[in-house]
Structure formats: structure tokens, C-alpha cells
């Protein structure tokens, strides 16, 4: 009987990002992000509304220029979570389920990722 293949670290962290994406509250896209350094999870994020604000899945998307502006993207939410907890993201790796938009890519680069 063959043993189950143990996932690589990259596979493991990407699966965590996929799990985070299941919490997304915008039906247009479910995206997850996990920030990792030295095999340690620093922060996670998914696309969703600001705390205390209505979710797209409850009240509908707010579309401006073909983008939902009701939500923050997964990458931004992960960076915000890290910042709120005083976590240094310099040198970290971002595992993301979807391609980052230009704004999120710039934010990740600016955060040293």
C-alpha cells in the first residue's frame, strides 16, 4: 500500500490560501492570501468587506469601473492584519490563489514581499 504523498511547503501554504479564500464574501471572486516567512504563517487574508460593513453576498456588489469597491482584496487584508499585529513582512512570501491586481502587487512589494 502506497503512503500518502506529503505536500511540499509550497503546496501546503497554497492550500491554506485556498482555505482562506472560502471565507471571501464577494461572489465575483473568492481569493485567499497567506503571508509566510521561514515556514511560519505571519498573516492571512481573503477578499471581503471592511469590518462591520455589509457583505456583497448580503447586499450585492458595489461596482465602479468594473471592480467591486465594497471589498478589500485578500492581499490587502493580509497586509492589514500583519500591520495591526505589528508583524514585520519584509522578506516574506505571499501565497495567493489568484493573480494580484496592480495595486495589491505594489503594496506587497512596498511591504518587502
Image (spheres, helix red, strand yellow):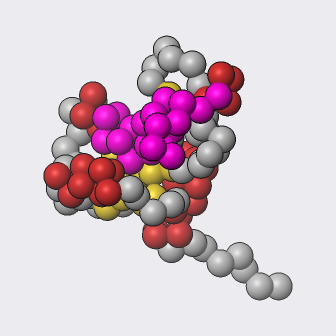
Residue in the image at 19% along x and 44% along y: 88
Q: Quadrant of residue 50?
A: top left
Q: Is residue 100 left or right of residue 63?
A: left
Is residue 9 located in the magenta-colored stretch of the structure?
Answer: no
Q: Is residue 80 magenta?
A: yes
Observer able to see residue 55? yes
The quadrant holding residue 60 is: top right
**Res 71 visible:** no
Q: Whole-percent x and y of residue 9?
A: 46, 69
Q: Residue furthest toward the bottom?
A: 2
Q: Please say if 43 is above or below 2.
A: above
Residue placed at 17% from the left, 52% from the top? 110
View extreme (front): residue: 65
Q: Quadrant of the N terminus?
A: bottom right
* Rendered location of residue 23, percent (x, y): 61, 38
Left or right of 84 in this view: 53: right
At 50% across and 60% down in the image, what residue appears? 98
Quarter of the image containing the C terminus?
A: bottom left
Q: Position of residue 17 (x, y in %)?
A: 52, 54
Judge left or right: residue 39 versus residue 50.
left
Relative image position of residue 34 (x, y in whole percent) = 43, 51
Looking at the image, how many numbered discs can be counted on the residues?
Answer: 0
Which residue ends up furthest to the top in the rendered image? 52
Quarter-wise, where is residue 86 in the image? Answer: top left
Residue sitting at x 65%, y 22% = 59
Could you tell whether 84 is left or right of 53 in the image? left
Q: Nearer the viewer, residue 68 or 13?
A: 68
The magenta span reads 60-81
Amino acid at each position: 500500500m502506497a503512503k500518502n504523498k506529503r505536500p511540499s511547503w509550497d503546496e501546503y501554504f497554497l492550500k491554506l490560501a485556498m482555505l482562506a479564500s472560502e471565507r471571501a464574501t464577494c461572489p465575483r471572486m473568492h481569493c485567499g492570501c497567506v503571508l509566510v516567512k521561514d515556514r511560519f504563517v505571519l498573516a492571512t487574508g481573503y477578499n471581503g468587506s471592511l469590518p462591520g460593513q455589509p457583505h456583497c453576498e448580503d447586499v450585492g456588489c458595489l461596482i465602479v469601473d468594473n471592480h467591486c469597491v465594497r471589498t478589500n482584496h485578500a492581499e490587502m487584508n493580509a497586509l492589514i492584519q500583519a500591520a495591526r499585529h505589528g508583524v514585520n513582512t519584509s522578506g516574506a512570501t505571499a501565497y495567493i490563489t489568484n493573480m494580484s491586481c496592480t495595486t495589491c502587487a505594489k503594496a506587497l512589494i512596498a511591504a518587502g514581499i
